[in-house]
Image (cartoon, rainbow, N blue to C red):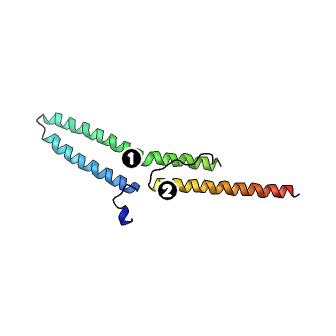
Amino acid sequence: MKKRNAFTMRSIRNKIILVSKLAGVLLVISYVVSTRLPVHPDISLLLWLGFVTLLVLGVDRLMGRFISEPVSGLNRAACRMAQLDFSAPCAVDTGDEFGELSASLNQMAESLQQAFAALEEANGMLYSGQ
């Protein structure tokens, strides 16, 4: 990994590491706070478990946004391209590896369209020459 990209959010790996570290820090802080609350320990535990549940749901939402949604978009575009439907480009624009893959898929689709057009033209010339 390049040194200048080590602390940016331009890679999936960095996004996952950042979210997991923040979640860990929040878990520790929330546990310490919940054990110091002036309430019964059972209530403190329930409050902490509620916070943990919300934290897990938040991390799940972030991972869905960082990973699942872009992968779904890439898959839809690849399925269209597999059916030779190049009418809509891949619209994943995340600024990370998924965005790079999206741009590569779009470039591949454009190259395939040009190759198909050249083949159709060559076939037309062959059939008209007979």
Closer to viewer: mark 1 or mark 2: 2
Give the residue at x 38% y 66%. 2
- The amino acid beneath tag 1 is Met
Residue reaching furthest to the left: 38
- Mark 1 in CB contact with mark 2 (< 8 angstroms): no
Q: Is residue 83 left or right of residue 99?
A: right
- Quadrant showing the C terminus: bottom right
Residue 62: where, in percent of width, then height?
A: 37, 45
How many residues crowd around disc 2 within 10 Å: few (fewer than 14), some, or many (20 or more)? some
Give the residue at x 62% y 50%. 82
Give the residue at x 36% y 43%. 60
* Image-quadrant location for residue 8: bottom left
Q: Secondary structure at mark 2?
A: helix
- The amino acid beneath tag 2 is Glu
Residue, disc 2: 100
- Quadrant showing the N terminus: bottom left
Closer to the chain start, of discs 1 and 2, is 1
Residue reaching furthest to the right: 130
Residue 31: where, in percent of width, then height?
A: 19, 44
Residue 65: where, in percent of width, then height?
A: 41, 45
Residue 72: where, in percent of width, then height?
A: 50, 45
Residue, disc 1: 63
Task: Between residue 51 and residue 130, name the one nearer to us.
Answer: 130
In this figure, what is the number of numbered marks?
A: 2
How many residues crowd around disc 1 within 10 Å: few (fewer than 14), some, or many (20 or more)? some
Q: Secondary structure at mark 1?
A: helix
Give the residue at x 32% y 50%. 19
Task: Between residue 72 and residue 105, name the one nearer to us.
Answer: 105
Give the number of the disc on residue 99: none
Tell me the CA gap for discs 1 and 2.
19 Å
